[in-house]
Amino acid sequence: MTKRKFIVRVVGIVLIIILGIGGKVYMDNKRFKDEMLNVVNSGQAKQVYEKTLKNADSKALTSDGIIKSYKVDYDSVKHNPMGGIMLKLIINDDNQLYIRVTLDQKENGRLTNSSGGGSMPLEDMLEKENMNND
């Protein structure tokens, strides 16, 4: 075997190994993302979202509340390095109005919102509404 054929074979083997590793990493990341999306779409997560919204606006999801509807911003779903899943809830179909949520699973298996907060425009609207009610 000539030196050239040997080099071509070695390069080919290295490329196959790199493609195999890259494919495995991609599939692992995709599976992890799919698992996060399953949690984000679960009924238990929806209960957490609605409780979070009601904490921000006691009349949330009613015709009297500031927060009338919400949807999950799936592009914002990320793993929190400290544990849990970070995401944004878009309020009233307005991308400027959102609440950040960090879903965390407790020892008993229940999901909770361990941190988060609203966008400034939403916070301003809620604060203004609270002042009007006082």
Image (cartoon, grey):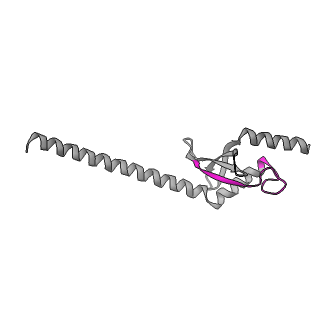
In the rendered image, which quarter is residue 117 located in?
Answer: top right
> Magenta span has 63?
yes
Query: Image check: 130 left or right of 1?
Result: right
Q: Nearer the viewer, residue 104 or 59?
A: 59
Task: Decide if residue 13 is on the left or right side of residue 48.
Answer: left
> Which residue is more in the foreground, 14 or 112?
14
Determine which quarter of the picture holds residue 4.
Answer: top left
Q: Is residue 69 magenta?
A: yes
Quadrant of the image occupied by residue 11: top left
The residue shown at (51%, 56%) is 34
Q: Which residues are magenta?
A: 55-76
Q: Is residue 46 left or right of residue 131?
A: left
Can you name the residue that lies furthest to the left here? 1
Q: Going 58% across and 56% down the picture, which residue do you hit?
A: 39
Query: Viewer-proximal residue, 101 or 126?
Result: 126
Residue drawn where x is 77% and y is 41% of the image: 123
Query: How many numbered marks are there?
Result: 0
Which quadrant of the rendered structure holds the N terminus? Answer: top left
